[in-house]
Image (cartoon, grey):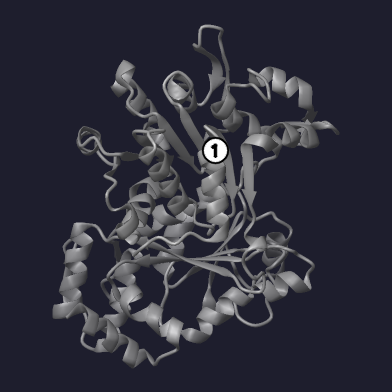
Amino acid sequence: MIYTPRNYQNLIHDFAVERERCNIFASPGTGKTSAGYRVFDTLRTFGEANRMLVLGPKRVAKNVWPSEQRKWMETFGHLKVAAAIGTPAQRIAAVKSKPDILCINYDNIEWLVDGYGDAWPFDMVLADESTRLKGLRIELTKNGNVKGQGSSRAKALARVAHKRVRRWINATGSPTPNGIVDAWGQQFFVDAGKRLGTNFDAFQSRYFKAHQTPDGYSQLRPLAHAQAEIEAKMKDCSITIDARDYFPISEPIVRNVMIDLPPKARAAYLSMEKELFAEIERHAVEVFTSGSKANKLLQMACGTVYYDKEGGAVDLHDEKIEALRSLVEEWNGEPIFVRYLYKTDLQRILKEFPRARYLDDKQSTEDAWNAGDIPMLVAHAAGAGHGLSLQHGGRVLVDYGTDFNLEHDEQIIERIGPTRQYQSGLDRMVYRYRIVARDTIEELSCLPRIASKMSVQDSFKLAMKHRR
């Protein structure tokens, strides 16, 4: 496809091209990734950039950036992109391929910086979900060295950020999830302390006052002048793109988060699809009807499969858990409402996210969610139908799995949907993310069913047609 930018993506492009180092604060769903490709492509064309390093959470670095290039192949296909994700050998292979754009997750920054040493080749860096850099607590000495406290990955990155990187872009939809105290660490990579101070202690002393909470924790509370002054200092190097200015607030923004089944999971899936039988971790899984097969394929897409009628189950892959973890990180602590299909999915989610709560039939659970006391609420669509008002607790819905039930699909979004947000006086967008297993019944059958409201039988036939 040919990339055709929207108006706000043109604003992002022009702002970033005109400034060597800047912040792009754009709402989720506004196309920061494709805009980033265009910025780099423009700068590279005019000799302003040679190679770009993209930093991001694991899923973003591994899947989002490479897939976005494939999507706009006719525009960005000439750029060589590689993801340094996985084992050391896999990461080394990606680095040795010398791509125009190298994508890597934040956890491996130290490995990359140490590996290149003085031969650092990237003159442009785009920090996707740049709030990962908020933990920086250092200062830059007169000779350009780094000293002080803070996260090791941010400290490693700071060693090359100003000495060897000419172009820098911070990109995030939530720049200060825990308050404006998060601004300093990110801004340091833009201007080395020019606007907010060269070390965190001075920034803290100027704009915050320590406060002791009743339960013994120490918090930094901004002084009266802090927010306005910090925003004014960052204004010339930052642009904000608010989805509410470009999308109808009456409709949720829906995005599909695509995951790929690992080879073993893919082999088991294809075996079940073709033979009605699969062997998973020495467990035989067999079905006898097309309806049972569809149900089993959905389980496989989600990652855990029942192998007997007594509820025995075996994990097939972790891709959806990883995608959900990435979305949690992307929203930086904002509450998330999660829909699941199978009890095994619920069990895995609750295990991976200890603070998550199951939506039971107790009024206290609904009240706690609406009061902001639950960071993740997990519900089955059949138990979250009419009568529940959950809009005060959040505006982000994640479908861990998608099936054929159109009524459930429509009902679950209405628990936090735009209408309820508006009726409650909440002027904010609603987001829906579907975690979808690529080239499975979810993508080939369930999504068409939901989009066109075709019958279950017709949508299942469509999936088989695509497979052939």
User: Residue 350: percent from the left, percent from the top?
Assistant: 49, 57
**Above or below 406: residue 19:** above
Location of residue 272 (image quadrant): bottom left
Q: Quadrant of the C terminus?
A: bottom left
Identify which residue, 270 or 431, lies in the foreground: 431
The answer to whether residue 314 shows anywhere in this view is yes
Q: Nearer the viewer, residue 153 or 51?
A: 51
**Residue 362, percent across and down?**
67, 70
Q: Nearer the viewer, residue 137 or 293?
A: 137
Residue 1 location, x and y as percent? Answer: 34, 65
In the picture as drawn, the residue positioned furthest to the front comes out as 46
In this rendering, would 421 be left or right of 340?
right
Instruction: Give the x, y percent position of residue 105.
Output: 39, 39
Name the residue at 63% across, 18% down. 199
Which residue sits furthest top? Answer: 143
Specify whether residue 394 is in view: no
Does residue 191 appear left or right of residue 64 in this picture?
A: right
Left or right: 137, with 33 as reference point? right
Residue at the location (56% across, 9% down)?
141
Residue identified by numbered label 1: 18
Q: Residue at x 45, y 51 (%)?
A: 33
What's under tag 1, amino acid-wise?
A: Glu
Q: Residue at x 38, y 67 (%)?
A: 436
